[in-house]
């Protein structure tokens, strides 16, 4: 019956641990189909960059396309041996770039080289040997140009050069086709024309799928990063920047939610503790603010570790004042926490001595968080009046309110 409140108002670490307990522990690699796993091994390697993956995918597919085209042209007798050998050599060059990237090198320079190699070498060669404007070369120009624009998006000058290259080369080839039609090698038959068109179209579709997939992966990666940054910002808004504890507003909201939940089960135990470092202003004025910050961070770290281990939540209410919410805790458990906190601080003194503090505890949630805080504050005030370096409990049943 106590477990539910603990999960609701406990520290963020406990909630994340609880959620992780229900997550399928199988890794993404284990759930992949073997063929899909092989594809990711070929393309991704050790990189998580969408740009690197897109470049590797394109180079690998382009190399396979060169080899496939050479084989098709050889067995179908579409072109002479010069074209077949040249395309094979270009395919080997693209495959070598893919191997180079697989070793972890950056894709920027290789993308520029690959784009120029294809735009100046492979595609003009394909143009002259595959019937120019009547052939499928313009489709290849479009697909490869799209690849270059996608991958070189972050390099404006390179993108400009590639754009001019993929604009001027096709226009120049179209002009040559018009002025010197004899330079163009025609297909030996209509069947050869149809086969080459179908093969080229298939290659273009594969390349476009690679680019679209790369864009989706890039979008997913950026979306994930945005979510991570948003979560960090949200978490930073809940935490005190110096100590990492919940700040006053977020702690107050958690404690208020617990009070409202406790109204449903009035008999449920619980404790609200307010701690205040003794003579902290004197420490700050005497030893400096840097030492004062060190004191606050050290106390916060010890407090958080002990409170988190007991399913509670710690926050900094401002200055040298801290608050602890212990769902389901009774007086004995609070005394054990308080005693342990004092022992740890005593055993690990700072440069100018151990950290000492006073505490006020209000057991049993009140009707509102404001009333509960007032009880703990009253107990803290009494602890200071009694000489500090102690913790006092507030008891609602007693007329004086403090014991």
Image: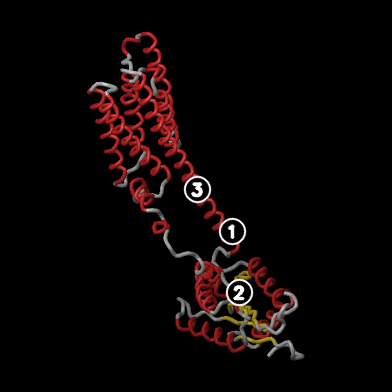
Q: Are the residues tagged 3 and 1 within 8 Å (C-beta)?
A: no
Q: Secondary structure at mark 1?
A: helix
Q: Are the residues tagged 1 and 2 within 8 Å (C-beta)?
A: no
Give the residue drawn at x 73%, y 87%. Answer: 396
Q: Label 2 belongs to which residue?
A: 322
Q: Residue furthest right?
A: 399
Looking at the rendered structure, which numbered label has been put on residue 366? none
> Which one is closest to the eye, mark 3 or mark 1?
3
Q: From where the camera sits, is residue 200 visible?
A: yes
Q: In the drawing, does residue 266 fall left or right of residue 353?
A: right
> Which one is closest to the eye, mark 1 or mark 2?
1
Sequence-wise first label, 3 or 2: 3
Q: Label 3 belongs to which residue?
A: 220
Sequence-wise first label, 1 or 2: 1
Quadrant occupied by the C terminus: bottom right
Q: Secondary structure at mark 2?
A: strand
Please tell me in which quadrant of the rendered image residue 141 appears. Answer: top left
> Which one is closest to the eye, mark 3 or mark 2?
3
Looking at the rendered structure, which numbered label has been put on residue 234? 1
Which of the pair 241/397 is nearer the observer?
Answer: 397
């Amino acid at each position: 019956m106590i477990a539910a409140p603990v999960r609701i108002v406990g520290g963020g670490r406990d909630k994340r641990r609880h959620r992780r307990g229900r997550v399928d522990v199988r890794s993404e690699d284990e759930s992949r189909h073997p063929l899909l796993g092989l594809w990711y091994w070929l393309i991704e390697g050790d990189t998580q960059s969408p740009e690197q993956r897109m470049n590797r995918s394109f180079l690998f597919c382009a190399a396979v396309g060169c080899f496939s085209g050479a084989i098709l042209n050889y067995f179908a007798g579409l072109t002479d041996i010069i074209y077949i050998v040249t395309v094979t050599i270009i395919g080997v060059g693209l495959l070598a770039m893919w191997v180079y990237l697989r070793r972890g090198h950056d894709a920027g320079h290789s993308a520029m080289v690959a784009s120029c190699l294809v735009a100046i070498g492979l595609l003009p060669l394909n143009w002259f040997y595959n019937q120019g404007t009547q052939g499928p070369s313009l489709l290849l120009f479009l697909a490869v140009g799209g690849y270059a624009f996608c991958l070189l998006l972050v390099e404006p000058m390179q993108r400009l050069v590639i754009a001019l290259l993929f604009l001027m080369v096709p226009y120049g080839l179209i002009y040559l086709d018009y002025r010197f039609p004899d330079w163009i090698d025609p297909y030996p038959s209509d069947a050869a024309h149809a086969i080459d068109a179908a093969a080229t179209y298939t290659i273009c579709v594969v390349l476009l799928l690679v680019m679209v997939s790369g864009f989706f992966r890039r979008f997913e990666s950026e979306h994930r990063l945005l979510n991570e940054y948003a979560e960090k910002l949200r978490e930073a808004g809940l935490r005190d920047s110096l100590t990492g504890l919940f700040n006053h507003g977020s702690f107050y909201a958690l404690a208020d939610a617990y009070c409202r939940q406790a109204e449903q089960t009035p008999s449920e135990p619980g404790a609200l503790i307010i701690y205040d470092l003794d003579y902290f202003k004197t420490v700050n004025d005497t030893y400096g603010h840097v030492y004062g910050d060190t004191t606050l961070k050290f106390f916060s770290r010890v407090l958080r570790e002990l409170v988190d281990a007991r399913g509670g939540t710690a926050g900094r209410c401002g200055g040298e004042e801290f608050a602890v919410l212990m769902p389901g805790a009774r007086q004995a458990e609070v005394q054990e926490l308080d005693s342990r906190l004092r022992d740890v601080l005593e055993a690990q003194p700072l440069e100018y001595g151990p950290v000492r503090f006073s505490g006020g505890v209000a057991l049993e949630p009140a009707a509102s968080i404001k009333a509960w805080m007032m009880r703990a504050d009253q107990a803290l005030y009494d602890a200071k009046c009694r000489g500090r370096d102690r913790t006092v409990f507030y008891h609602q049943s007693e007329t004086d309110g403090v014991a």
